[in-house]
Image (tube, coloured by chain):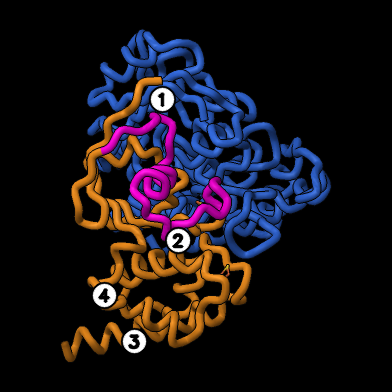
Amino acid sequence: MNAVEYAKPQSIDDAIRCLTNAPVGARVLAGGTDLLVQLRAGVVRPPLIVDLKGIAELRRIESTADGFRIGAAVAGAELSEHAEFSSQWPGITEAFNLIGSTQIQGRATLGGNLCNGSPAADSVPALIAAGVRCIVVGPSGSREMAVEDVVTAPGKTVLTTGEFISQFLIPARAAHSGDAYLRFIPRTEMDIAVASAGVCLTLNAAGVCTAARVSLGAVAPRALLVAACADALIGSTLDDAAMAKLAAAASAACAPINDKRGTIEFRTKVAGVLARRAVTIAAQRARGN
Amino acid sequence: MAKHHVTTTVNREPVELLCDPSATLLDVLRDELGLIGSKEGCGSGDCGACSVLMDGRLVCACLVLAAEATGHEITTIEGIADGNKLHTLQQQFLEDAALQCGICTPGFIVAAKALLDRNPDPTETEVRFWLAGNLCRCTGYDKIVRAVMNAAAKMREEAVHG
Ligand code: FES
Ligand code: FES
């Protein structure tokens, strides 16, 4: 490990200043569950590490009139322990509960899971399905963007020098809506998704789907929001024909890698299966809401 | 390389030290403070042998920078017993022979304590999921899980009867 300096700014402005004036290669630190592994492996040698956990806004969970405002440096376990949040958004909660061990969940953050840029990050399809947006702050001010627009390729984001995500804006769950997240791994726990699906949908009194968002993980260079999947569901009663259309649309959207953990064919097929099962769970939840 | 000044609390004792800014909490516990109960199995968050509590929350000390410990309370395996009196979990690991080489044991005991502090009456499934981040090369886990269940039962008894 060759980092030379550690800074823990106490405000967003100080952090931006710190990052803007830093030598090339400075890194932000939130939960550290990816950064410390990279440091140890010698993959990165940042001259400066900027710890964002000193900034109050980044560590808060606020419930607002529009939903929740959640600091980017809030750990997955802190979110899951928030009773009001986890009852409104069980799918997002389940996704965070699948990331690593108890030890990892207590550290790994919302911002980190997104900005690490892994196509298999569990929380990302769940956040995309729920229509979550985030606030990016930086030297030229702040901007708001959809979670699906942050990552561009494995390990790459749209963030530029001095920028970081400060907060996530999670909408209040609409009436008669539900979300769900499922992933496939070859074992029961402690593994990385081979394929995954996040779903959020709304049903009307007649059981017709009036809104849906479907996101797939680990089957493309980044998590995908698949409009064709939503189109397959909207206007249907989630009958067999709609579900078949959904699964076909999910598989058609896949452009996965081929590796020992899952072949292209397997990932493509399983993405469709997971999308269908996640829709079934989300629909049960929507009926109960 | 400028040293970083850390002011923290370890096992209820205030601690001040200077460390390399890239040193992990595990490095500092073992090499600076001589608290070698926490083990380094992997250094990458996979094995749980370095498990410690940070403000009561279970973390891998190998994934925390020592610099991050400033202002926080750290509890290591050395802080679990009450003086010379072993914690019920420690005693139960001995009685149930829940260790062989012992490398994983400090991590398991700290992790199990974090669980029982939150949930004094966990199911076996809850114990197994909670401890999924702690690896053991020797025991096959069964005796560990049994020791945690038995310790939990004894601690519930103690809580009722004092
Ligand atoms: S040494 Fe920290 S998890 Fe293995
Ligand atoms: S007792 Fe040897 S690793 Fe667990």
Looking at the rendering, the stretch of residues picked out in magenta corresponds to B17-46
Q: Which mark is residue A49?
A: 1
Do labels 3 and 2 touch, CB within 8 Å? no
Q: Is mark 1 within 8 Å of ligand 1?
A: no
Q: Residue at x 62, y 59 (%)?
A: A277
What kind of residue is marked 4? Answer: Asn
Letter of the chain in orange? B
Q: Earlier in the sequence, mark 3 or mark 4?
A: 4
For chain A, what colour was chosen? blue
Judge if badges 3 and 1 mark residues of a common chain: no
Tag 4 residue? B84
Q: Residue at x 36, y 68 (%)?
A: B115
Q: Which mark is residue A285?
A: 2
Distance from disc 1 to disc 2, alpha carbons, whole Å, reads: 42 Å
Q: Give B37 or A39, whichever is nearer the viewer.
A: B37
Between disc 4 and disc 2, the foreground one is 4
What kind of residue is marked 1? Answer: Ile
Q: Which mark is residue B153?
A: 3
Assess whether residue B21 is covered by the magenta stretch.
yes
